[in-house]
Amino acid sequence: MSQLRAAAAAGGLRRSSGRAVPAARRSRKGASPRGGTAAPPPTPHVFSDPAEIGALRRNLLAWYDRCKRDLPWRTLAATEPDADRRAYAVWVSEIMLQQTQVATVVDYYNRWMQKWPTLQALAQASLEEVNELWAGLGYYSRGKRLQEAAKKVVFELAGRMPRTAEDLQKLLPGVGRYTAGAIASISYGQATGVVDGNVIRVLCRLRCIGADSSSPAVIDQLWDMANALVDRSRPGDFNQALMELGATVCVPKAPLCRECPVKQHCRARCRKLFGKPTPVPDVEDCGVGGCPLCPPATEPWDSSLGVTNFPRKAAKKQPRVARSATCVLERRGCHGAPEYLIVQRPSSGLLAGLWEFPSLPLDQDLQEEKQREALADHLRAWTGWPVVAGGLRFVGEVVHIFSHIHQTYVVYSLPLDGDVTLDTALSPSRWVTEEEFHASAVSTAMKKV
Ligand code: SF4
């Protein structure tokens, strides 16, 4: 408790004329990071004490040195002497980690780096190979864009990765502000911050930011904060430490505040313990009236939630509901083993270039009999085989949630006992054994089917 009080007393105040005055009360004008003038954020939501910033950096880095997870991209970033190779290794990991858990990524990452250890190797790969290796990782456009950007580096930038976050973002397709900051800080030691989902959660809690964390005002504030906090001598480690803290300690539902290395700097925790963001009398919570970073008046602090009052997000848009009929066509291969027909999806749009069982989008309210007939028509046109609706065996329904689509596949099967001539004017298609199917560039949804 006393440690908390002492640390809180050091934070949030600027010393002036011997009297501590809350920064927000002293001045409402300041230089905007974008060049204009703007009111500084209210005191409870900023780090304004250099001593506190220094202590937070030290505490976080010491914890990271003790507790960080041993991950292959970290080893590569720490041991690879060539800056381009180092940047490439970090880049691949950052793209794979977007929307995907570390535990899932490790195996994909190792296989990727084994197959394409350099940008030059990746630039020579085909999209089919990239999709095959990416199969099951989801958000398939990530792999495609990574390969396109690798080609750009190799063929247009003479194989040299851009050397700053600004240039990485400007010159490489698919590299946004976060990825550029991560590559530049981890690979080149540029003192630039990063803001991802984990960092948003940690910073919003550290500074009681309860306005919609996906709003431009909050995101801008978090980037400013990340850039101000990042350790100047170990920026890559600091950024990874902040993300690691969000992933392992300051987790969304049940954060481990007692074990947290920066708990003495955390105003959400302070608010939970003392009822306000710091125990210092001069520093009060902004309240809900007009502060752009406080929780909205309609959703005030809920004491049953504690620190998980932060961050807050606007309600998510409901995913679109979609339905497809899909058919597993089976024949006996030349050695008697069953083979299945797969067809390739178009080269743009959802699951671009991936393979799937022949499928047909359905209207939502189509009756079973009608959807069966529609599928039979589709398959007849595709295979030239006299498929009749009654020959399709209903297997079941498979639901798969894409980021923005709630997709149901109505699955049928159709055994064939003769040869089938596929219309080559239609999408590419091929027969595969079960083993070949799993090694192909097929989505997780199709594996479920
Ligand atoms: Fe997160 Fe708790 Fe640490 Fe605050 S004290 S940063 S809420 S884990």
Image (spheres, grey):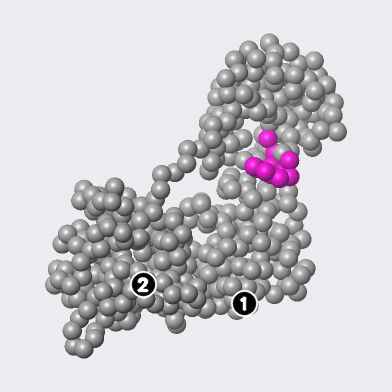
Density class for disc 1 (Cα within 10 Å; few <14, some 14-19, many ≥20) is: some
What residue type is disc 2 on?
Pro
**Disc 2, SS:** loop
Q: Quadrant of residue 232?
A: bottom left
Compared with 296, 192 (above or below) is below
Residue 408 colored magenta?
A: no
Quadrant of the snapshot with the C terminus: top right
x then y, percent, for residue 243: 42, 63
Residue 305 position, x and y percent, is 25, 49
Residue at point 65%, 42% (across, down): 351
Residue 435 drawn at (x, y percent): 67, 38
Residue 95 visible from this viewpoint: yes
Identify the disc placed on residue 215. Answer: none
- In this rendering, the count of numbered labels is 2
Mark 2 or mark 1, whichever is nearer to me: 2
| Magenta highlight range | 346-356
Helix, strand, or loop for circle 1?
loop
Name the foreground residue: 223 vs 114. 223
Q: Which residue is mark 1?
A: 163
Marks 2 and 1, the one that precedes in the sequence: 2
Which one is in front, 209 or 202? 209
Q: Which residue is disc 2 drawn over?
A: 40
Inter-mark Cα distance, 2 to 1: 31 Å
Q: Main secondary structure of the magenta part?
A: loop
Amino acid type, label 1: Arg
Q: Are marks 2 and 1 in contact (CB under 8 Å)?
A: no
> Does 121 sit left or right of 420 as displayed?
left
Q: Is residue 4 above or below residue 348?
A: below
